[in-house]
Amino acid sequence: MQKTLYIFSNGTLQREGNTLCYITEEGKRFLPVEDIQEIMVFGAVDFNKSLLEFLTQHEILLHYFNYHDYYMGTFYPREHYNSGFVILKQAEHYMEEAKRLTLAKKFVAGALRNIEQVLRYYERRGIALGDTLSEFTDNETQIESITDLSELMAYEGNHRETYYRCFDKILDHPDFPFDKRTRRPPQNNLNTLISFGNSILYTIVLSEIYKTHLDPRIGYLHATNFRRFSLNLDVAEIFKPIIIDRLIFTLIDRQMLTKKDFEAETGGIVLKEKGRKVFVEELDKRLSTTISHRAVGHPVSYRRLIRMELYKVEKHLMGEESYKPFVSQW
């Protein structure tokens, strides 16, 4: 199974023969290209055209983040699964408001159902979340009555804020209060973890889109405008509660991350390098974790689930099968 390569230190990434080489003050490290499916760069890394050509040959995406871990962009090798038909269908479903709203509602419904599943999981473990859960009852019926995207976005935003407030009950930790959602920069430790995890998930979904016929520039819940990619943001909404949020709860509960892993920087809070490494190592483990999947009849990894979700979107666009978002069954 190919891996994600995370680079946190400063150095130079280059092609050397038929493999990759990362050079730092500590020396050279060779990285077998066959083992890598994507590269995420957090450090100050130099590279040249020869490297980009090499990554293109091996269909490896390179995502880069700035000093504060904000996603900056992606080197996206030329599309290798070109399909004019799928792109036309994607555009059609975006341009026709009713079709766009139908897909956008599916993404929101999937996200809220998975949020509900997370809350039920912790309620079964004795945390009093019943009042909040009652607000998530019958979401799909309520979503169905929504008539435009701005109303849908507000509905989703209000429910997610309600959900985030439950983090205080689930975590019950003085060093990780929720208070309110803050971004760019996040103002406390918990918001830093949410932002960091979501940014990585967006890029992982983007990498999976690259392996389908879909065009990541055309999303439905998130507007397609001057933003480079938006479909990955739509699909990530479904998986954020069950992958990123559950991971955050685990890392804090097991004290794998503590307040010592954070520091104040230019008006916000950032994760130190050690903390980022712990986070991505555990995220990789979670993405490789397999769960039983009723539809396919055998276990599949969370990473594979993301790809399968994209295939379902593709079938919906082509009129083969109406899209139903993945909902966790645990």
Image (cartoon, helix red, strand yellow):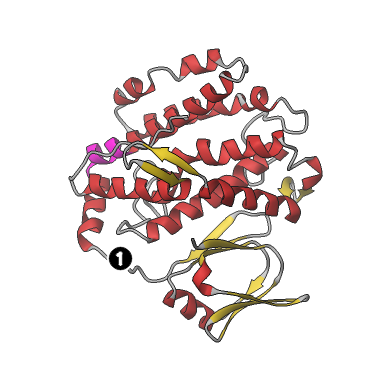
Magenta stretch: includes residue 96: yes
Tally of numbered tags: 1
Above or below 170: residue 24: below
Which residue, as the protein is rendered here, is positioned at the far bottom?
17
Q: Which residue occupies the foreground of this view, 177 or 321?
A: 321
The reply to whether residue 323 is visible in this rendering is yes
Please provide percent x and percent y for residue 102: 27, 36
Above or below 264: residue 74: below
The reply to whether residue 227 is visible in this rendering is no
Which residue, as the protein is rendered here, is positioned at the far front?
298
Above or below 43: residue 292: above
The boundaries of the magenta stretch are: 95-103
Would you name the residue on which mark 1 appears? 81
Q: Is residue 57 left or right of residue 22?
A: left
Secondary structure type for disc 1: loop
Please provide percent x and percent y for residue 278: 69, 50
Above or below 96: residue 213: below
Please provide percent x and percent y for residue 252: 70, 36
The amino acid on which the numbered mark 1 sits, given as a three-letter code, is Tyr
Q: Main secondary structure of the magenta part?
A: helix
Q: Tell me the residue at 48%/27% (across/down).
A: 117
